[in-house]
Image (cartoon, rainbow, N blue to C red):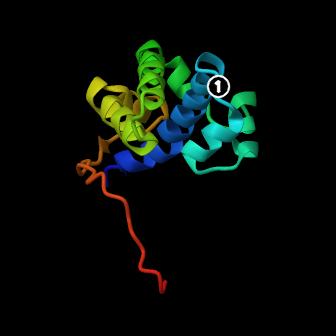
C-alpha cells in the first residue's frame, strides 16, 4: 500500500499556522496595527497574537528550509497589504493556500516532511463560511 497524505493535512499543520504568524508580524510591525486589532481580524485572543509575534505559535522550519521560502514570505507581505486595504482575512488566507498549491510548496513540504508515495488529490475549497442555525 502506498502512503498518502491529504493536502489539507499539510496545510492545516504547516501552512496556516505559519501564514497566520507571519501575517500577524507583518500587520503589527509593518502596518502598525495593534495586537488587539489583529486578534479581532483573526478571531483569536490578543494573547494568541502575542504568541505569534514572539514565535511561540506559527513559524515552520520545513517552510524556512524550502526553496519556496522567499516566495512564501513575499506572498505574506502582499497579503498583509491587501488585508490593510480591506480584504477579508479568510479570503486572504485562502489566497495563500492557493499560492502554496500552485507554486509547488505543498509538494515540497510533503517531500521535506519525509513522506513517500502520492500526495492526495485536493478538492477545490468552496470558500464558503459554515453558518450554524441558532438552535445548535
Instruction: Locate the N terminus and report the quarter of the image it occupies.
Output: bottom left
Establish if 81 lies above or below 42.
above
Point 75% across, 29% down: residue? 54
From where the camera sits, is residue 22 visible? yes
Point 58% across, 26% down: residue? 27
Q: Is residue 117 left or right of residue 114?
A: left
* Number of dots carrying numbers: 1
Establish if 126 lies above or below 104.
below
Q: Secondary structure at mark 1?
A: helix
Name the image quarter holding residue 17: top right
- Residue 103 position, x and y percent, is 30, 24
Q: 32 or 22, which lies in front? A: 32
Q: Residue furthest front?
A: 86
- Residue 29 position, x and y percent, is 65, 19
From where the camera sits, is residue 60 visible? no
- Residue 99 position, x and y percent, is 32, 29
Mark 1 neighbour class, 10 Å CA radius: few under 14, some 14 to 19, many 20 or more = some
Give the residue number, with chain letter if any, for mark 1: 28
- Residue 80 position, x and y percent, is 48, 25
Establish if 127 lies above or below 53.
below
Name the image quarter holding residue 95: top left
Q: Is residue 53 left or right of residue 115?
A: right
Point 69% across, 40% down: residue? 36
Q: 94 or 58, which lies in front? A: 94
Q: 131 or 115, which lies in front? A: 131
Q: Residue furthest bottom?
A: 135
Amino acid at each position: 500500500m502506498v502512503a498518502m497524505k491529504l493536502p489539507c493535512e499539510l496545510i492545516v499543520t504547516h501552512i496556516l499556522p505559519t501564514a497566520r504568524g507571519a501575517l500577524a508580524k507583518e500587520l503589527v510591525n509593518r502596518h502598525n496595527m495593534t495586537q488587539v486589532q489583529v486578534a479581532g481580524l483573526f478571531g483569536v485572543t490578543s494573547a494568541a497574537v502575542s504568541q505569534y509575534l514572539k514565535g511561540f505559535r506559527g513559524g515552520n522550519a520545513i517552510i524556512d528550509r524550502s526553496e519556496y521560502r522567499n516566495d512564501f514570505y513575499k506572498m505574506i507581505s502582499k497579503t498583509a497589504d491587501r488585508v490593510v486595504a480591506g480584504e477579508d482575512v479568510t479570503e486572504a488566507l485562502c489566497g495563500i493556500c492557493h499560492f502554496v498549491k500552485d507554486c509547488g510548496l505543498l509538494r515540497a513540504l510533503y517531500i521535506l516532511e519525509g513522506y513517500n508515495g502520492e500526495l492526495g488529490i485536493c478538492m477545490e475549497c468552496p470558500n464558503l463560511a459554515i453558518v450554524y442555525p441558532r438552535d445548535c
